Image (tube, helix red, strand yellow):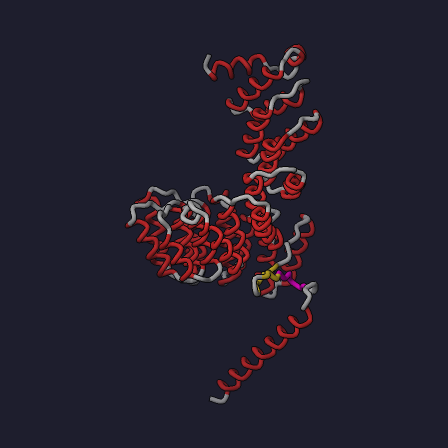
Amino acid sequence: MSSTAITRRSLIKWNPEGGNFLSTMTSVGLARTLRSLCIAGHLSKAVRLLCRSPVCPGARTYSLLLQECVNRKDTRLGKRIHARMVATGFHCGEYITTKLLTFYVKIGDLGSAWKLFDGMPHRSVVAWNAMISGCARGADAETQERAVELFVAMRAEGLAPDQFTFSSALCACARLAALERGRRVHAVAAKLAGVGGNVFVASALVDMYLKCGCPEDARRAFAAAPERNVTMWTAAISGHGQLGRAAEALALFDRMADDGLRPNDVTFLAVLSACAHSGLVGEGLRLFASMSSEYGVTPRGPHYAAVADMLARVGRLRDAYELVKNLPDCQEHSVVWGALLGACRKHGGDVALVELAARRFFRLQPGNAGKYVVLANTYAAREMWDSVAGAHEAMRALGVKKDRAWSAVEVQGKMHTFLAGDSYHDECSAIYEVCTALASAVTEQSMGATDGVSHC
């Protein structure tokens, strides 16, 4: 019998009110019905049936349900499945615990993931990789730091990292700009056969070295790669663009095409951003026009945002607005209105345009704290203090709070993280003393330069 027939029969037989059906269902029958519902795309119905059933399915069925929740990033249903396991006393075992761990990492609940990870008597490489990946993509330096620590701990337990481990560890080093630790991870990868030349590891190496400000090391890693895919070329283009090396980024884009690889939407976003940061408006607009005409890539919101930013950086705010206004479904692209709002803050723009961009953006993302600060700062630059107070009041009314700004620096292999207004560092007094001295020196130099001009 076909899977479609099974699915239809299961859907007909299953009735939420059908107590007889549930009371006579076996574990095997429940597993078959749950799988059929998942195949048919009825995950919520499957979870409802699971929670009403007097019997439990096996590990394979729980794995399927959790994987569906991961694919859909459905937090509510995934947690209901976990709760059902706990309520029925289901013994998860290493395999299902790893599935749960992966689910919590994917939805960004690292707290729950850590509890599962700490409670595992035996951890597979997959479990370690899930935690390292989740921490590497964390929102703060402390979480990213734990990814590197987990990499070290994993090796200390005698497990051999694979390409996914190295990619995540290098991602953490890149986000921390932790060059020395990135080099140590690179050294470990180079010693393992079949890993150092892996295209994903090589891409992460290129990205790490560029984000740490070492284009020569990135170039060597790029040249040494036995094969290069679109991801690696895009990492190289993006990294050079972020370093202000637009000429190199554009040259890499052309070389990529010469190698027979077609750029994807992420590649175009990288090269458009490179043009924006270097003021290459003509070249950027040419590339933007070529996306659909030459490469068959449909521009999305982030691409229009990059072009709007590009135009605004050279004072063409009105052109940026016309681009946004004429965008298909422009009302639905918060990233574009956010880019226009940010551009008005940095590069001028009349108040009416600022407020229009703000209204459109907050209609789509009312809880974005960063843009409220941008709006308030824009008003402050124009000494519109009542409007500044209004922006702050709107934040309070919505319960929106902006995360404190932070930065990190690596000194002799150790990361030092600082928050805005920080007073917790061991050498806090000495650091502030040096900062004050530097500020005074800059002020004196500026005044000296001004005096020099006045006497000419």
| Magenta region | 417-422
In the image, 302 versus 164, the foreground residue is 164
Q: Which residue: 61% across, 59% down? A: 406
Judge whether residue 203 is colored magenta: no
Residue in view at x 68 percent, y 49 percent: 399
Q: In x, y percent, where is residue 38?
A: 54, 24
User: Residue 286, percent across and down?
Assistant: 33, 53
User: Would you say 449 lies left or right of 400 here?
Assistant: left
Tell me how many marks there are. 0
- Who is closer to the viewer here, 427 or 252? 427
Image side of residue 107 versus residue 333, left or right: right
Residue 140 placement (x, y as % from top left): 60, 53
Residue 106 drawn above or below residue 271? above
Query: Is there any visible trace of residue 139 in the rendered image?
Result: no
Is residue 131 visible to us here? Answer: yes
In this image, 323 relative to 140: left or right? left
Residue 74 is situated, as x and y percent measured from the top left of the image, at: 58, 34
Residue 105 occupies which quadrant of the picture? Answer: top right
Q: Residue at x 43, y 44 (%)?
A: 300
| Residue furthest out toward the bottom | 455
